Image (cartoon, helix red, strand yellow):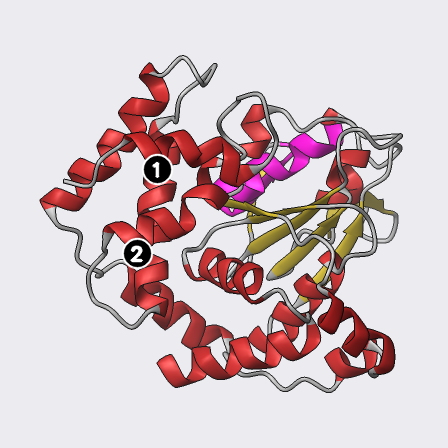
Amino acid sequence: MQNTLTQLLTSANQIILGKELQIRLALCCLLAKGHLLIEDIPGVGKTTLSHTLAKLLGLNYQRIQFTSDILPADIIGSSIYDINKQQFSFHYGPIFNQMILADEVNRSTPKAQSALLEAMEEHQVTVEGHTYKLPEPFFVIATQNPSHQIGTFPLPESQLDRFLMRVELGYPNHQAERELLIGQSRTHLINNLPTQLPPETLITMQNAITEIHVSAALLDYLQALIDYSRESTEYSCGLSPRAGLALLTAAKAWAFMENRDSVLPEDVQAVLPSVAGHRLRSGTSDSAAIVAPLLNNVAIP
């Protein structure tokens, strides 16, 4: 399994240049059965990253372009009257795919954004009293433009909390951008990617992650981080129980990717900025700066 993960990361790094950590975090998020939020300016590779992961994982992939006039029915689907059968039949929306790219999700209204809540939390949607299961595995990768850009609606906390991780890509370094400029089209390279981690193997890995050992001392450290976030005046609102579970699950997935059968404090620290950065409120939007007080002031037992 580890060889497969290594090959997958190598292939992804050949498409998204100079972003090894972000790609590793994205894969960690999917292994942990989480949803991923990618926030950055247009044109840095957010959509390319999601498409690359879908190809390498062999998942049914659907891009939904969020706009100010998109409706929940455009995402979930709707019941349409069939004149031949003289009855209503449900027409499935694009949400019924294994991987969804919610592109520029914060350009839609809160009403449209809310269409994702049940799907992301329970892997099902309810339409007119009927519940429809979503395929497994099911992931949402959403891209978000910075809130200062024109035409954006901030995601409410309830929506942000559904994302296990948030990552930022940023500009490529000088060497990576030079390779990008003289290299082949990213679209062409993605279309030629083979599936390296089929869905059934991905599900096997996800199940293996649940068996990763967590010691009592590690749980003490995790709870100390959570308690500090709630008690410190540096944050207006601390980490919720759901956030604590998300942090533990992500740390297990990171330990699995490091080929270990137990979680170390270093695993928690590696995923903390991506898991907690969008859940905590302080005077900055930089995830590393947001969690710095936690890492600096909470001692490892």
Task: Indicate whether 63 appears above or below 71.
Answer: below
Verify whether residue 207 appears in magenta.
Answer: no
x, y percent for residue 222: 25, 38
In-front residue for pair 252/69: 252
In-front residue for pair 240/22: 22
Quadrant of the image containing the N terminus: bottom left
Q: Main secondary structure of the magenta part?
A: helix
x, y percent for residue 95: 67, 51
Quadrant of the image containing the C terminus: top left
Q: Which residue is mark 1?
A: 295
Instruction: Return the mark for residue 252.
Output: 2
Pointer 2 local density, CA inside 10 Å: few below 14, some 14–19, many at least 20: many
x, y percent for residue 82: 84, 49
x, y percent for residue 73: 77, 39
Instruction: Give yes or no for contact between labels 2 and 1 (Cβ–Cβ under 8 Å).
Output: no
- Residue at position x 86%, y 81% in the image: 182
Q: Earlier in the sequence, mark 2 or mark 1?
A: 2
- Residue at position x 67%, y 35% in the image: 115
Magenta stretch bounds: 111-128
- Distance from label 2 to label 1 (Cα)? 18 Å
Task: Indicate whether 41 appears above or below 8.
Answer: above
- Residue at position x 86%, y 75% in the image: 181
Task: Mark 2 vs mark 1: give the one in front.
Answer: 1
- Residue at position x 20%, y 41% in the image: 300
Q: What amino acid type is highlighted by mark number 2?
A: Lys
